[in-house]
Amino acid sequence: MTTAEPALRDAEANALFHGLENLPGLVLAVSGGSDSTALLVMAARWAKQLKKRRPKLLAVTIDHGLRPESAREAATVKRLARRLGVPHRTLAWRGSKPKTGLQETARLARYALLAQAALREGYEHVLTAHTLDDQAETVLFRLARGSGVTGLAGMAYASPLPAGRQGTIFVVRPLLHVAKSRLVATLKAARVTHSEDPSNRDPRFARARLRTVMPALAREGLDARCLARLAARMRRAEATIEFAVVAARAALAPDTWRERGPIVFEAERFSDLPAEVGMRLLGRAIAHTGDEGPVELGKLELLYQALRQSRSRLRRTLAGASITLAGGRLVVERAPARRTAPATAALRNSGIDSENT
């Protein structure tokens, strides 16, 4: 017989928001589900008990327009927020909805709308209700897709969300170490109801399918706390690797990271780096000089392997960057613009090899 999880005591709940008391304001992302409703209730109680300056709170509900119940759920959140003395706003995700990748597109749209709400108020922090269970699902989801150390580190307590020229919004996850069952118990103790999103159980979505196997994994010892502990250890490893990458960048190419490159490494010193450090350094150089953003891990691994296996010469393009190994140097620079067929023919007639440009 399992013992029911207890509700969070006031002191426990207030401690979750420690360090946020001096901020001017906080946007609370509240969908109406158990986790975000608990976030709203606990944040309102926490702010009310602060004796000195307290941050202003704004609850924001994103209506994705994907279910007929969503407008009613947003209205329910609005009533609860009013009862708690927290201003509320409902923002709608407008426009056509994709047939594939719906959840990921909806997630990006949700963060964009939350960032807009924060910017309008002059706030820089959005609080979401990600829990210990969400962290475990994230790790399992990424593990199933072959993520590296960065992916298995899971979600961070706080992470930046670029908001264009107007600055950066920080997403803060104060409930990341709290089990969902304790939040449900907290709402029950407060006699606050919440909604249930049926998409959380929809087998069309990968996360919903993973939730069905979590109980079996837990019986074998791989429960939410175990997966979250793995994420914490991966974050420690991630920080160590990043420290080494920064040191390697300073040692191997301190003066070549200007504007868009080129970036030059001594090939022998580069090859002496530990594989993970060298691969990340190469990826940063490609992202810095190219024009297609961060490099997909699988493609970066293939390129790094080719460099390690090549004895003297290699030339490749990846993510808008040209990577050349020759004369004891590894040069990463912006790739030339794609040429049309006549231009390619002209190059061939001039004796220049265009196969790898």
Image (cartoon, rainbow, N blue to C red):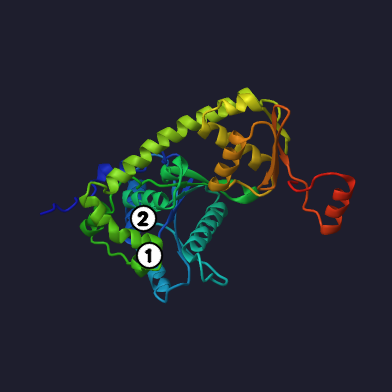
* Residue 191 in the image: above or below residue 268: below
Occupied quadrant, residue 28:
bottom left
Label 1 element class: helix
Occupied quadrant, residue 306:
top right
Cα gap from disc 2 to disc 1, whole angstroms: 9 Å
Task: Residue 175: give x, y in percent of width and height.
Answer: 34, 48
Task: Residue 94: give x, y in percent of width and height.
Answer: 55, 70
Occupied quadrant, residue 351:
top right
Name the foreground residue: 85 vs 285: 285
250 displayed left or right of 201: right
Q: Earlier in the sequence, mark 2 or mark 1?
A: 2
Task: Residue 232: give x, y in percent of width and height.
Answer: 37, 38
The residue labelled by disc 1 is: 77
Residue 40, labelled with which disc?
2
Q: Are marks 2 and 1 in contact (CB under 8 Å)?
A: yes
Task: Residue 133: give x, y in percent of width and height.
Answer: 32, 52
Residue occupying the far bottom of the picture? 68
* Residue 248 in the image: above or below residue 342: above
Name the foreground residue: 85 vs 39: 39
**What residue type is disc 1 on?**
Val
**What residue type is disc 2 on?**
Leu
**Where, quadrant-wise, is the N terminus in this rendering?**
bottom left
Residue shown at 54% from the left, 45% from the top:
297
Estimate how packed mark 2 is, as few (under 14), some (14 to 19) or many (20 or more) residues with alpha carbons within 10 Å: many
Estimate how packed mark 1 is, as few (under 14), some (14 to 19) or many (20 or more) residues with alpha carbons within 10 Å: many
Count every numbered label the image shows and give the total: 2
Residue shown at 57% from the left, 55% from the top:
120
Residue occupying the far left of the picture? 1
Name the foreground residue: 227 vs 78: 227
